[in-house]
Amino acid sequence: MAEITSEMIKDLREKTQAGMMDCKKALVETGGDMDKAVEILRKKGLASADKKMGREVTQGIIASYVHNNKKIGVLVELKTVTDFVARNEEFEALGKELCMQIAAANPLYVGIEDVPEDVIGKEREIYREQMKDSGKPANVIDKIVDGKLNKFYTDVCLLEQEFIKDQGVKIKDLIKQKIAAFGENIEVGRFVRYQIGM
């Protein structure tokens, strides 16, 4: 088993933002395997993030972004539990990243629960109409319609979109990672996107 040095603990801490003792435990547990230790800490952090997601958010910031062509601008309300986290540079950077995401991907809603029922009904109707002459059984059509609806959510809901800077990560997962790092709940309240000529 490899000796666990303070340099290894420091390195792991920088990679994961986890506490010193957690880093040491993870390295001991994995016999000094840095990649496995990162995986353990990420799982632990995301599990604790799930618990923190229910906490009430009463603090936060209004983040803003104006594209360099001055034709698109975005404001986002990003909320958290304490003012201490709200004033953190990384929290502000998350706000800016979300603004840039909204500028680029143009979502219409924050999450699936924000999509009005009549909009969902209309989409379902359109997809069913597209499938009516397919000759497929009703249960297969239902599955296809659900699949198309999920694709619709990834287009119009911010939290369901893939992060423009990391295509394998959804925005809701990015926020969950930040909850794990900060140790506090984080929510996107509202956003508005302005575009010249739209």
Image (cartoon, grey):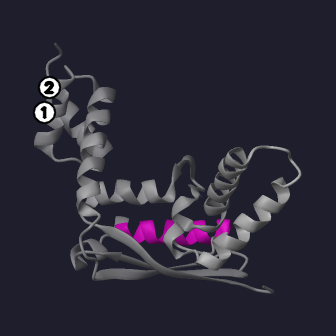
Q: Quadrant of residue 72?
A: bottom right
Magenta stretch secondary structure, dominant: helix
Contact (Cβ within 8 Å) of mark 1 with mark 2: yes
- State left or right for residue 7 relative to residue 185: left
Establish if 5 lies above or below 133.
above
User: Pointer 1: what residue?
Assistant: 25
Q: Which residues are magenta?
A: 91-105
Q: Amino acid at mark 2?
A: Val
- State left or right for residue 144 relative to residue 18: right
Is residue 87 visible in the rendered structure shown here?
no
- Which residue is drawn at the image coordinates 33% and 28% (left, top)? 35
- Which residue is drawn at the image coordinates 29% and 44% (left, top)? 16
Q: Amino acid at mark 1?
A: Lys
* Element type where label 2 sits in the image: helix
Count residues near mark 1 (Cα–Cα under 10 Å), then give few for <14, some for 14-19, many for 20+. Answer: some
User: Pointer 2: what residue?
Assistant: 28
Q: Residue furthest top?
A: 1
Q: Position of residue 91 (x, y in %)?
A: 36, 68
Q: Position of residue 159 (x, y in %)?
A: 51, 63
- State left or right for residue 70 relative to residue 165: right
Q: Quadrant of residue 69?
A: bottom right
